[in-house]
Amino acid sequence: MTRFRPCIDLHAGQVKQIVGGTLDSATAELKTNFVSPHGAAHFAKLYKDNDLRGAHVIMLGPGNADAAREALAAWPGGLQVGGGVTDGNAGDWIEMGAEKVIITSYLFPEGRFSQERLDAVLAALGGDRSKLVIDLSCRRNGEDSWFVAMNKWQTLTDMEVNQESIKRLEPYCSEFLIHAADNEGLQRGVDEKLVQRLAEWCSIPVTYAGGGRNLEDLETVKRLSGGRVDLTIGSALDCFGGNGVRLEECVEWNRRQG
């Protein structure tokens, strides 16, 4: 059944909510919806206290590892960590308390999917696919086409998100995370067509993020996906300075789903 999944987005060591399509190396171009006065551990404890499992901690660029470690220390075994994860450090993040690691850009050297790198990451996790989440965050490329975007969602790769690519990757991971980068941080609603497609294509758990505004969007995702897709809401949450929905309302939503 569709559930609310929380997030902790880290940029330059701070918890932020950003407009995904503006996230490049030129800080002047970055559009920020919210910068929290609280550290990552504050939100990790908040999610733990409300039993909000499956939260993703995303390190957006360098300078975020310490903040991510603080979050893991606040809730060992309760958080997923992504951003800069490779075969060289995936096992370390698990040892530091991550429930799962999330991998994306490392799988696409020069924008091309590498099966060899995926095999290496899984091997670094002892072959345990339950510890791996593949992030297929994407941008639209036409009316009914999405391509995986890497390098902070600025570069389109050669992988289209479709039934073929999903089926190819499912044997290697326990779930997918899909940021619709064109919607991320804009609070203008979810990409309904993408949500529908994900429900059709995926046979393992999948979380959609991007554009979620309120409880009505949770209802929409539940309806469109038949309860098979979870939704992350970020910028619209009161704990991130938003006025679309209160965290406690999302907690109550999850409780009602059973």
Image (cartoon, rainbow, N blue to C red):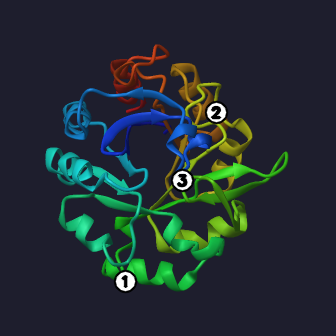
Q: Residues within 10 Å of mark 2 (few under 14, many from 20)?
A: many
Say what secondary structure mark 1 lies in.
helix
What is the distance, in whole Å, between disc 2 and disc 1 at their CAs? 35 Å
**Of 46 and 109, the residue lying toward us:** 109
Which amino acid type corresponds to the residue marked 1 in the rendered image?
Ala
- Relative to 183, 209 lies left or right: left
Where's residue 69, x and y in %?
A: 21, 53
Where's residue 113, x and y in %?
A: 62, 75
What is the distance, in whole Å, between disc 1 and disc 3 at their CAs? 25 Å
Say what secondary structure mark 2 lies in.
loop
Residue at 51%, 20% (x, y): give it: 215
Q: Which of marks 1 and 3 is nearer the N terminus?
A: 1
What is the distance, in whole Å, between disc 3 and disc 2 at their CAs? 20 Å
Which amino acid type corresponds to the residue marked 2 in the rendered image?
Val
Which amino acid type corresponds to the residue marked 3 in the rendered image?
Lys
Residue for badge 3: 152
> Does 24 appear above or below 170?
above
> Does 93 appear above or below 145?
below
**Of 228 and 62, the residue lying toward us:** 62
Residue for badge 1: 123
Mark number displayed over residue 190: 2
Say what secondary structure mark 3 lies in.
loop
